[in-house]
Image (tube, rainbow, N blue to C red):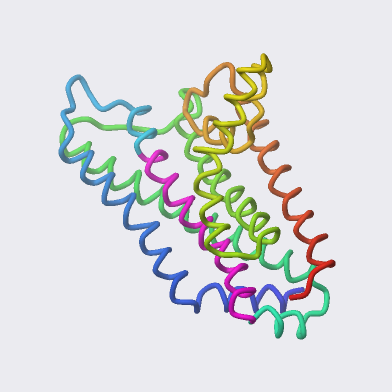
Amino acid sequence: MIATVHSEWIKLRTVRVHLVMLIIAVAFPLLIIALVTSLSSLGSGFGDRNFVELVTGVSVVAALLLGTVSAISLTGEYSHGTIRPTFAATPSHVRVFVAKVIVNSLATAVVVSLLLAGGWALGATVLSGRGAPVGLAWENGTLGSMVSLMVLAVLISWFALGIGLVLRNAPATVTLLLVWPLLVENLLAGVGFLIGVDWLGRWMPYSAALVAISPTPDGDALGRPWAFVWFGAVSLGLIAVGALLDRRRDA
């Protein structure tokens, strides 16, 4: 298993598109944080929660881009046929999929952790220089929000891998990954509201996890940690379905 994980790590870090997406995922949020904290009107103060919502809000973009990396790391192998030598070297397909989950999860967690730490330090330094210091604490939900964003990013990578295993197509997987919370779940929730099933929107897994990263989640939402448990279960379910379908299809 260690050799399989090492092999997946080599593939993840040596493909150029992965590195490009990684650079964008880190640079874009840091740029936005620097601009907003430098140019915004402080008024009576920026506020801890406002600042953390800025950091986590722009970092969601990074989480989606890292989810795209996870999707491409799998579907790209099917598109280019490199999955065949992978399966030849490791006949157990499940072991390959588990290795991809491990490598993408660890890579995502490390990158997002560094991004959150760097983004918070950058913004806090700028705001402190402008006379509006900010801080983190469990009591007001700001620290929990930062940790929740890291968890969300890892779960998005699982969700991306699950979709990729089912579809085996990079453009379709990336498109579905990006539009799912904006279009699919909103449509399902809207249909549920029209037919009188108001609670359906609360159980949309992706949307519930996105709401749960807020320092003060909506009282009607699932909230932490159950929103993440539910989204994680759905994502792992997708991976399991994809693994079962893989047994019925050629590489």
In what quadrant of the picture does the N terminus appear? bottom right
Segment colored magenta = 55-81
Q: Would residue 25 appear left or right of 98 to someone viewing this image?
A: left
Figure check: 134 above or below 75: above
Residue at 59%, 17% in the rendered image: 220
Front-lying residue, 230 or 166: 166
Residue 134 picture location, percent across and down: 31, 32
Residue 212, picture quadrant: top right
Figure check: 51 above or below 5: above
167 inside magenta stretch: no
Residue 83, picture quadrant: bottom right
Residue 14 picture location, percent across and down: 50, 79
In what quadrant of the picture does the C terminus appear? bottom right
70 inside magenta stretch: yes
Front-lying residue, 1 or 63: 63
Q: Main secondary structure of the magenta part?
A: helix
Residue 97, picture quadrant: bottom right
Figure check: 62 above or below 220: below
